[in-house]
Amino acid sequence: MNDLQNFINTLMGIEFKDVIDIILVSVILYYLLKFLAGTRGWQILIGLLFLLSVWLFAKILHLNTLEWIFENLWSLGIFLVFVIFQPELRRGLAKLGEKGIFRFLTATNKKVVDDVIRACLFMAERKIGSLIVFERNVDLTNYIEGQVKIDSEVSSELLITIFTPQTPLHDGAVVIKEGKIAFARCFLPLTISTDIPENIGTRHRAALGISEETDAVAVVVSEERGEISICVDGKIYKNLDALGLRKRLYKLLGIEKPSTFEILRKRLGKGKNEEKK
């Protein structure tokens, strides 16, 4: 009875600011776990939770030696967190600095994406390896090396020419920035993740690496299998067909699908033009 009364008194003592406090902490924990899920940091976090459970077990059973070891380890805990989670922290801070916590993407021109898709399908059919990176909110200049400035309008023909074997710019990546081909022959940071298949080549590792460090979207064409993949947020989506590639790029790059009204209007306009002819 006393326990119930204490519980009721505790509930009655909760103020509005306490509710806000709990909600904010819950949201932060949710996004932190969501951010770490599927990354190297997630495995490290599980290991730390295991160590924490061992420490609590030692406290309950009064295992003095283990207690002493863990209490000395926790004093270095903050330093170890910054060292161990350094890649994840850098990536997270970069994302927070993009445009605040809530990201608003600048929509990429639909024609640009369609030209990239046509080029990728052409190169995949002929097994021409390529790596095309779309810059979004994070400036990629500090993450690329050896680049050659292009500053040209995007066209499928130009992209195919750049990646044709034996041409001067075919090695490395192309970076598309603000609707233009900004750079070619870019060398990108390779992924440090150990959770990737061994048969993934350098292009895919570079695509994963730039997507781990920034919010860029990388499209890869494999010269061995002729497969098209997309890397974003440190994850890879492999073996995409034309429809899957278009659907993902449209979504990631903020391209809105035409409404039913617009489709009907275009068809009616096309029909009227044919009648006039």
Image (cartoon, helix red, strand yellow):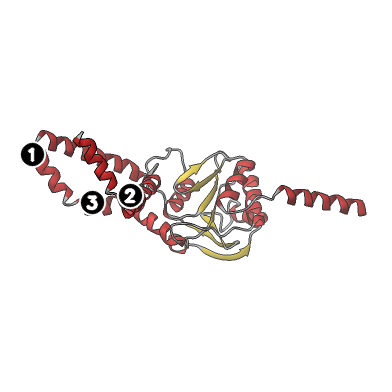
Q: Residues within 10 Å of mark 1 (few under 14, many from 20)?
A: few
Q: Which residue is mark 1?
A: 65
User: 180 or 82, which lies in front?
Assistant: 82
Q: Quadrant of the N terminus?
A: top left
Q: CA distance from mark 2 to mark 1?
A: 36 Å
Comparing marks 3 and 1, which lies closer to the viewer?
1
Q: Left of 237 or right of it: where is 109?
A: right
**Residue placed furthest toward the left:** 64
Q: How many marks?
A: 3
Question: What amino acid is labelled 3 in the image?
Answer: Leu
Comparing marks 2 and 1, which lies closer to the viewer?
2
Quadrant hosting residue 112: bottom right
Comparing marks 3 and 2, which lies closer to the viewer?
2
User: 205 or 254, which lies in front?
Assistant: 254
Q: CA distance from mark 3 to mark 1?
A: 22 Å
Question: What amino acid is labelled 1 in the image?
Answer: Thr
Q: Is residue 145 visible?
A: no
Q: What residue lies at 29% left-to-right and 39% top-to-bottom?
A: 46
Q: What residue lies at 53% left-to-right and 64% top-to-bottom?
A: 148
Q: Which residue is mark 3?
A: 80
Residue 133 on image: x %, y %: 53, 54
Q: Residues within 10 Å of mark 3 (few under 14, many from 20)?
A: few
Counting residues from the start of the chain, the first of labels 2 and 1 encountered is: 2
Q: Is residue 6 visible?
A: yes
Residue 210 on image: x %, y %: 45, 53
Q: What residue lies at 87% left-to-right and 54% top-to-bottom?
A: 273
Label disc, if present, on residue 22 of the rendered structure: 2
Above or below, 208 against 162 in this view is above
Residue 158 on image: x %, y %: 65, 57
In terms of secondary structure, where does tag 1 sit? helix
Counting residues from the start of the chain, the first of labels 3 and 2 encountered is: 2
Question: What amino acid is labelled 2 in the image?
Answer: Ile
